[in-house]
Image: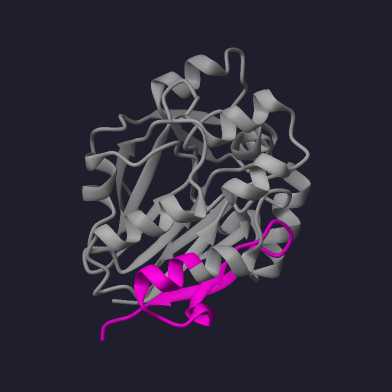
Amino acid sequence: MTAMRFALLGSGSKGNALVVEQGATRLLIDCGFSAREIEKRLARLELTPGDIDAIVITHEHDDHWKGVSRFSRAHDLPVWLTPGTQAAKPGSELAATELYSPHEPFAIGDLELFPYPVPHDAREPAQLVIGNGEHRLGVLSDIGHVTPHVRAMVDACDALIIESNHDPDMLAGGPYPPSLKARVGGRLGHLSNAEAAALVSEIDTGALQHVVVAHLSESNNRPDLARAALAEALACTPDWVHVANQNEGLSWRSLVNR
């Protein structure tokens, strides 16, 4: 079996998109950039839109949805989304719509997807564990607080993409208006560095080959703070923790048998 691999086209409040590949199957997880920008960012990975088999959307917020209608129609790609996400975007024109439940696994090509619900201020948000039968990639972003079910889903993964959105002190003293500060730091907002680190310290990380910090705020966080928090929880050096940023994302990472 060929190695499963993944790369991020970009991650942050201005846009999010992830590519996961197993054999001939390539999925685009979220499409939070314009269609043209998605094409440019795919090219950096030596991919074209024709290499993508389907788009899977986690929720309807613009930084995960922005380009999906135009990109799916331009390249005749089916879009998988929850019924709640579909209801939150009435009138959206997609090439084809496939509904998934955040409680039931499904497969696309050579990849298995295990969605799970998360507390976030969207209609029916989900996150994903993606596997190939040997390895599991946990994707956890846009979540206000960790539930026991979330903890169980991302336990013992081989790679983990985890939101480490803000430093509470920077958020409190930052430029956001009070209402937005309350939303970001609230129970339906985003994880802080300390909350992400606490989750990592509570799960089995023995199989981890990669840990990626995602959805890092450009206004209320710094990469070194997020890295340090996760590294302490993992008992590793900070340089082992990858950071996916808004502009460059993160290049290919592979999951291999040890």
- Tell me which residue sits at (42%, 50%) in the image: 195
Magenta part of the protein: which range? Answer: 229-258
- Tell me which residue sits at (45%, 54%) in the image: 194
Q: Is residue 45 above or below residue 140?
A: below
Q: In which quarter of the image is the C terminus?
A: bottom left
Farthest bottom residue? 258
**In magenta segment, residue 245:** yes
Q: In this view, does 156 lie to the left or right of 223?
A: left
From the top left corner, tell me how far across and down residue 125 is, in percent. Answer: 43, 30
From the top left corner, tell me how far across and down residue 11 is, in percent. Answer: 62, 53
Residue 5 occupies quadrant: bottom left
Total tally of numbered discs in the picture: 0
From the top left corner, tell me how far across and down residue 19 is, in percent. Answer: 52, 58
- Tell me which residue sits at (70%, 68%) in the image: 44
Q: Is residue 15 above or below residue 255?
A: above
**In magenta segment, residue 254:** yes
Q: Can residue 105 be seen in this view?
A: no
Q: In this view, does 75 lie to the left or right of 28?
A: right
Residue 74 occupies quadrant: top right
Q: Quadrant of the N terminus?
A: bottom left
Of residue 199 and residue 154, the one placed in the foreground of this image is 199
From the top left corner, tell me how far across and down residue 202 is, in percent. Answer: 25, 58
Q: Is residue 257 visible?
A: yes
Of residue 124 and residue 46, the one placed in the foreground of this image is 124
The type of colouring in the image is one colour
- Tell me which residue sits at (59%, 28%) in the image: 182
